[in-house]
Image (cartoon, rainbow, N blue to C red):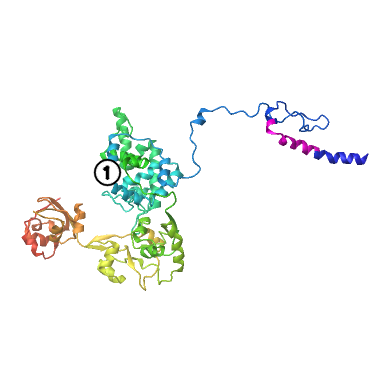
Amino acid sequence: MLKRLFYALALLPALWLAGCASPLAVPADHAATSSVTASADPGTGLPSSPDSSTSVYPGGGLKPLAAEPSLRSRSVQSLLPPADLWERVRRGFAMSDLDSDLVRERELWYSSRPDYVARMTERGSKYLFYIVEELERRDMPSELALLPFIESAFNPQAVSSAKAAGMWQFMPATGKYFDLTQNMFRDDRRDVIESTRAALDYLQKLYGMFGDWHLALAAYNWGEGSVQRAIKKAKRTGTGTSYDDLVMPMETRLYVPKLQAVKNIVANPESFRVVLPEIGNHPYFQSVEIERDIDVALAAELAEVPLDDFRALNPSASKPVLLAASHSQILLPWDNAERFQSRLAAYDGSRLANWTAWVAPATLSPAEAAKRVGMTEADLRSVNKIPPRMRVKAGSTLLVRRSASLNSDVTEHVADNGYLALAPDVVLKKTVVKAGKKDNVASMARRFSVSPQVLANWNKVSTTAAFKRGQSVVLYLPAKARSGRGVKARGKTAVAKATRRTPVKTAAKKKPVKLARQ
């Protein structure tokens, strides 16, 4: 009796497992035709055996789901990223399109200049991937990656007449507001990573103010205060407040149409007969840390990168040396970064940097300062951009060649706070001279013993420019040339007093010049 009970108990788990497994063994055609649910064995409480006419599946088989119109209208995104970065940019377009005659005119302007488009897109190929990544990370429209085409033609060294700098064209004050360092050793308005961070911060701020990307772009170009005042004026007069409706300067009126034209060309280059360079959808550069000061030329050599390409990725470093204290991160092409690190570790040269910083203990002439640091005056002036007739004020920081007494890396304090303050040897005052017949920059520079480049900068012309007879030419001359007989004198006497030098012989042959007061 006990033995039979033992066998019965041992058989129960097997029967239970068999009952659980039986539905899986039902053929598909049986499941499709059966309309009865599985019943339990009254003796055991377990499902009945599979040879019964029951089934665990509902009757009628599988039925198709009802079609959902909203599902049919949605596109399915590819799981694979595009190989071409331009296609990735197109997929991220999210701004409303602007359609106007100004857009058509800008499309024609760009498409009729294929060489110009090729140059700026080739320059932009180094930076576009990084910018697109940052835009996607912030969930911003990818059209904004094309904005440097409008601002600077993707030239990080670009400087406008209003002193805006970098590929995003930051003014000095705006750059400081967005924490872009600007000192004698670096200008982060030109830095690829820092300027992009600041530009996107600014654009996000403007979009938050206006709630419209066209108005945000207008504010980026014209200033947020100007756009706010234009909107208030439009509301007072009962006119529209959109980008198309506001009264604004022509430069700002053309700003968004320029971006729209570039967007249209990127969206469909074939229709404009424009060939865009191939840009892979992968990083162009990566950052590398440096722990010691290193010459720019040596860094490019160790990375096996042409010097121009190295400067294109590190445009904020205007000096011939990279300072680890303030510029510890440099950018290198992706495939060259590892090469640079291994070659730097194995470098057995005498020193990595041939330059360091020196703080002037007193106000000195460039000649005196050069003598103290063991350099020629010409080299000291050149590397520190000291113009003629200027003295170096006490406390100024100068970049100098290393020597036995000056052979250390630049400290963090000097790297972050160094400045160059200059004072004129003599007091210079603005003077306007009337040009004579056939006068040009070179002849006027010779006459007044100034550099042609300096004279051209004073008058915002090129060094090869010619002046019309009677045209006003701006000069900055010693103050004594503006008083008494120095102002009224003519010919050789006027030139001699204006320059405090013996005039060149050709000056006497010139017609009398007038020195007008300002």
Residue 276 in the image: state x and y as whole percent.
35, 47
Q: Which residue of the protein is positioned furthest toward the bottom in this rendering? A: 404
Identify the residue at image location x=38%, y=58%.
416
Q: Secondary structure at mark 1?
A: loop
User: In front here: 395 or 357?
Assistant: 357
Q: How many marks?
A: 1
User: In front here: 10 or 302?
Assistant: 10
Q: Is residue 197 above or below residue 335?
A: above
**In magenta segment, residue 346:** no
Q: Is residue 326 above or below residue 168?
A: below
Residue 175 in the image: state x and y as whole percent.
35, 49
Q: Quadrant of the N terminus?
A: top right
Identify the residue at image location x=84%, y=39%.
11
Region of the chain picked out in magenta, as a range = 15-29
Neighbours of disc 1 within 10 Å: few (<14), some (14-19), many (20+): some
**In magenta segment, residue 20:** yes
Residue 9 in the image: state x and y as whole percent.
85, 39
Q: Is residue 94 above or below residue 446?
A: above
Q: Main secondary structure of the magenta part?
A: helix
Asked whether residue 234 appears in the rendered view, the answer is yes
**Is residue 448 found left or right of 151 in the rendered image?**
left
User: In front here: 293 or 433?
Assistant: 293
Q: Which residue is mark 1?
A: 112
Residue type (three-letter) at the residue carrying disc 1? Ser
User: In front here: 315 or 505?
Assistant: 315
